[in-house]
Image: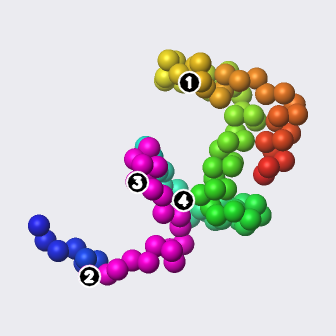
Amino acid sequence: MSEGIYDDIEFNYSKMPFEVCEKEEFEKTVYTPKMSFESSEIIRRLAWSLNLPMTKAVERLVNALPAITDAAKICNACKNKSACKNCIFCKSFTEEEKAALLAAL
């Protein structure tokens, strides 16, 4: 096997501009989407307004989406009908719950 160009570099992960997750947490990650520069800029500004790292801001935004999307449309398009029992889109949100989720943004 050939040597990698970074083999002799010791990384200091505490100075990295992103959060390094534990191996067990990483293994649960299924897909990391690539996004456009413009989308990244939008998320960066949203993260600044929330005073959070971008990864945490995206998580908060995604967690609020079920309260403001058309659940019937999501359910109709779903490709995993066996998960309905635990699916957040099957939950009915009260107006107070919706307001709380949106207020967190």
Packing grade of label 3 (10 A; few <14, some 14-19, many >=20) is few
Q: Amino acid at mark 4?
A: Ser
The reply to whether residue 76 is in sight is: no
Residue 55 in the image: x percent, y percent?
A: 59, 58
Figure check: 99 above or below 47: above
Element on which disc 2 rests: loop
Amino acid type of the residue tagged 3 in the rendering: Lys
Point out the stretch of residues depicted in magenta.
8-28
* Mark 3 or 1: the one toward you: 3
- N-terminal of the two: label 4 or label 2? 2
Please say if 64 is above or below 73. Answer: below
Q: Is residue 21 magenta?
A: yes
Question: What separation in Å lies between label 3 and label 2 (alpha carbons)?
Answer: 22 Å
Task: Check whether the beta carbons of the residues at disc 2 and disc 1 lie within 8 A of each other.
Answer: no
Local SS, label 1 = helix
Is the residue under label 4 in contact with that under label 1 (CB below 8 Å)? Answer: no
Q: Is residue 17 magenta?
A: yes
Q: Is residue 33 left or right of residue 46?
A: left
- According to the picture, the residue beneath numbered tag 2 turns out to be 8
- Disc 1 crowd, CA 10 A, few/some/many (<14, 14-19, 20+): few
- Identify which amino acid the numbered label 1 is placed on: Ala
Residue underneath mark 1 = 77
Residue 31, horizontal then vertical, whole percent: 44, 46
- Residue behind mark 4: 36
In the image, which is nearer the foreground, mark 3 or mark 2? 3
User: To which residue does mark 3 refer?
Assistant: 23
Residue at (67% x, 42% y) in the render: 63
Residue 46 located left or right of residue 32: right
Q: Residues within 10 Å of mark 4 (few under 14, many from 20)?
A: few
